[in-house]
Image (cartoon, rainbow, N blue to C red):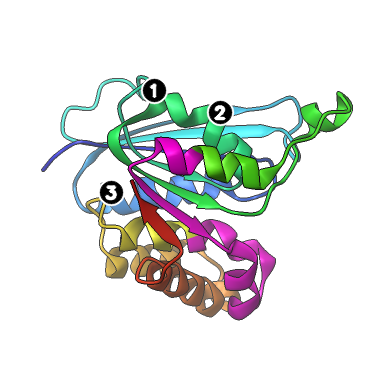
Amino acid sequence: MMNKNCLLCGVGGQGVVLASKLIAYAAMDKGMDVRTSETIGMAQRGGSVVSHVRMGTKIHSPMIPKGCADVIMAFEPAEAVRCLPYLKEGGVAVVNQKAVQPVTATLGGGGYDGEAMIAYLKKHVHQLYVIDGEAICQKAGSPKVLNVALLGVALGSKVLDIQMEDMKAELARRVKPQYAKMNVLALELGAAAVQSRDYKER
């Protein structure tokens, strides 16, 4: 079993921490050693959020060294670019295409072009999956399942040693029953996006 490093990043309120916990629980259920850590920005809802998940055997530190992440799951493009130094050569990046400006940028009067960020990622990431998270959430029936949709893409890319059935079982355990069906659908739609043309290999 190889050690895997997964870095999740986004803006507060998008479900970054929950997604990291789902990965961690699924890995622990498979007998892996797991370490996690979160960095939350100046505002829990609206600030930048970064979560480190390390899993495998003999994991001692919760923090992923720069250049060592097997996968970056980014809930919006600018956070993907900001965290790109953590991605290893040949690593996978899963990015939601919709730009969400964090509170820090809003307060500073700044802004950015999400498409420009995606273009930058296409030049610098060997295996990049850009998904229309809004479309998947609409099909699943809730905007709150974006985190699970991104999980589906990561699992579909086969970068993590976690199977779809493992994550579905985790969702059944961790999600309220009334939300289970939409979360499973979001997971499946995310995995299906890997087979579409919404990704690019450099």
Look at the image and tell me whether residue 139 can be seen: yes
Q: Which residue is mark 1?
A: 63
Find out whether the residues at labels 2 and 3 contact each other: C-beta distance under 8 Å.
no
Crowding at label 2, few (<14), some or many (≥20) Cα neighbours within 10 Å?
Answer: few
- Give the Cα separation between the discs numbered 1 and 2: 16 Å
The magenta-colored residue range is 121-149
Quadrant in which the N terminus is drawn: top left
Label 2 and label 3: CA atoms lie apart by 26 Å
Seen at 74% across and 25% down, the residue is 42
Say which amino acid is labelled 1: Met
Which residue is at the front of the view, 91 or 154?
91
Name the residue tied to disc 2: 82
**Dominant SS type (magenta):** helix
Residue type at tag 2: Arg
Q: Which mark is residue 27?
A: 3
Helix, strand or loop status at disc 1: loop
Nearest the viewer among 176 and 68 is 68
Disc nearest the viewer among 3 and 1: 1
Nearest-to-viewer mark from 1 and 2: 2
Q: Earlier in the sequence, mark 3 or mark 1?
A: 3
Q: What is the count of numbered marks?
A: 3
